[in-house]
Image (cartoon, rainbow, N blue to C red):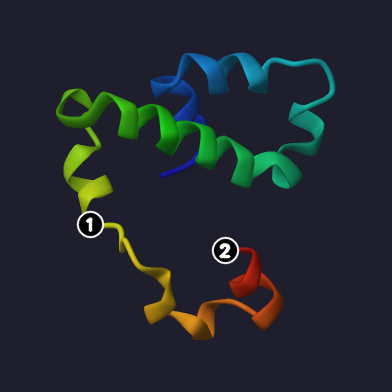
Amino acid sequence: MTVDMICEDSNLCSKLQKCDGLTDKLQIWMNSFYAVFFIEQLKLKEKSKYYEYLCSFPLNITNYPELFSDEEMEKL
């Protein structure tokens, strides 16, 4: 799933991508694009074409401590 795909399926991400100067820093903003997109899709529930994919996400991230530093785990 690329940022371009996300922008095709999200009006808000598409608008953010068109913001002046933001596309130059897209790598920096990529996580924000994904967060906005997934929140939008979660709100759509079964209406989202990504619903089954979203349902596969873990609900408890404490099972994955190796993915995060102690500081990041505390923030999460």
Left or right side of 45 for 7: right
All told, the count of numbered labels is 2
Most foreground residue, 66 or 4? 66
Amino acid carrying label 1: it is: Ser
Residue at horizontal 44 percent and vertical 21 percent from the top: 10
Q: Residues within 10 Å of mark 1 (few under 14, many from 20)?
A: few
Most foreground residue, 48 or 75? 75
In the rendering, at what x and y percent does residue 32 appear?
62, 40
Pick out the residue farthest to the front: 74
Q: Earlier in the sequence, mark 2 or mark 1?
A: 1
**Residue bearing mark 2:** 76
Please tell me the numbered disc located at residue 21: none
Most foreground residue, 28 or 5? 28
User: What element does badge 2 sit on?
Assistant: loop
Please tell me the numbered disc located at residue 56: 1
Q: Quadrant of the N terminus?
A: top left
Q: Residues within 10 Å of mark 2 (few under 14, many from 20)?
A: few
Rendered view: 52 above or below 11: below
**Tag 2 near tag 1, CB within 8 Å:** no
Q: Quadrant of residue 61?
A: bottom left
Q: Quadrant of residue 52?
A: top left
Residue at horizontal 72 percent and vertical 37 percent from the top: 26
Rendered view: 18 above or below 32: above
Amino acid carrying label 2: it is: Leu
Nearer the camera: disc 2 or disc 1: 2
In the rendering, at what x and y percent does residue 53 appear?
23, 48
Left or right side of 12 for 59: left
In the rendering, at what x and y percent does residue 21 appear?
84, 23
Pick out the residue farthest to the right: 21
User: What element does badge 1 sit on?
Assistant: loop
In the rendering, at what x and y percent does residue 64 appear?
43, 79
